[in-house]
Image (cartoon, rainbow, N blue to C red):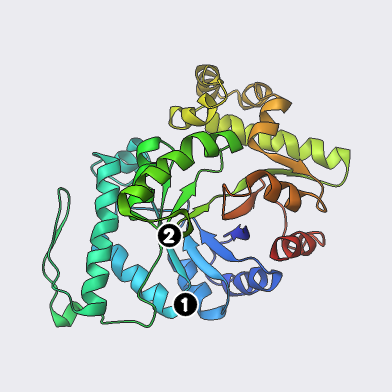
Amino acid sequence: MKLDVGMLTHDLKSLPAYARKVEALGFDCLWSSETQHDPFLPLAVAASVTSRMKLGTAIAVAFPRSPMILAHIGWDIQKASDGRFILGLGSQVKGHNERRFSVKFESPGPRLREVVLALRAIWDCWQNGTKLNFKGQFYRFDLMTPFFNPGPIEHPRIPVYISGVNRYMCRIAGEVCDGLHVHPFNSEKYLREFVHPAVEEGLRASGRARADFTYATSTFVVVGDTEEELQQNRQSVKQQIAFYASTRTYEPVLAAHGLEGLVPHLHRKSVEGDWKGMADLITDEMVDLFAVTGSYDTIGRQIMDRYAGLLDRTGLYQPYQPGLDDPRLPRLVQEFNR
């Protein structure tokens, strides 16, 4: 299992120093997400100042961008990074697509599948001179003149991951993608009994094996070396779990443990703005289902033991804002790298 890290800064001026630092610490991949900033620009900067670490989006929202735009961005970052780029895409939810991005939201599963297939067709055209002739339900690409063709690159095989929570999206990942971004709100049982069977169904349909596929996520961790530190960080994790569990999108994770009845209670408190009340509904037993607790000396081994065979990549999801300057962190990273 590889230990990755999320992009904690999107400031393009300070990003070179940040990227060099996380690479020197030994993290295997730097992931950039689409929240307050564009997810691709920081990776373009990081590509120019790093040499070993992989660089990926976790995730970029797919539908506001044409697959042709995504293809160009991915091609350029892949070339700049000498083949270290991973394109992670997600559908996002209806409200964000229609009200934040002002794009039509329809059939997210089939449409995201088509985005991935269109990307492959465009890249094949650029790399191998194959005539571009992609016609799907949602997209059509059949015009590529030499003036607009960037031409072949040294590392044309760009891994594409998608994010998924429900069974249908997980199956699509197994069928047409190189990996799945598992949502951080997950559990061992949910992965083993819900996610993996769906992905494996898709892998069988495409004639591929488990070895051809990567499961990536971030793991909620309650990490500390004193009881006071553990208790403080546990409360922050409870708050974040409550936030995700209040949304119907993530009900399958709770349903794996018979906890789906918690959703309406959490949702009501979220509407009321009762954030403390939401966290109070998350018991210590629930935290143990969805997070890993330990000291800096033990947390790495505990993560690897719990998710062996279920995850290939993970990062530390710490909503209590840890610092890269913590002297205990290098030891933790080294444990994964061993």
The answer to whether residue 217 is above or below residue 70 is above
Indicate the quadrant where residue 232 lies: top right
Given the current orientation, which residue lies at the most extreme right position? 226
Q: Amino acid at mark 1?
A: Ser
CB contact under 8 Å: marks 1 and 2: no
Using a 10 Å C-alpha cutoff, classify the residue at mark 1 as few (fewer than 14 neighbours), some (14 to 19) or many (20 or more): many
For the residues marked 1 and 2, what is the alpha-carbon distance in whole angstroms? 18 Å
Residue at image location 73% in from the left, 66% down from the top:
338
Q: Amino acid at mark 2?
A: Asp
Q: Secondary structure at mark 2?
A: loop
Q: Which x, y percent locates residue 91?
A: 35, 45
Question: 330 left or right of 321?
Answer: right
Indicate the quadrant where residue 237 lies: top right
The answer to whether residue 288 is above or below residue 210 is above
Q: Give the residue at mark 2.
A: 38
Q: Give the residue at mark 1.
A: 81
Question: 150 left or right of 86?
Answer: left
Residue at image location 50% in from the left, 75% down from the top:
47
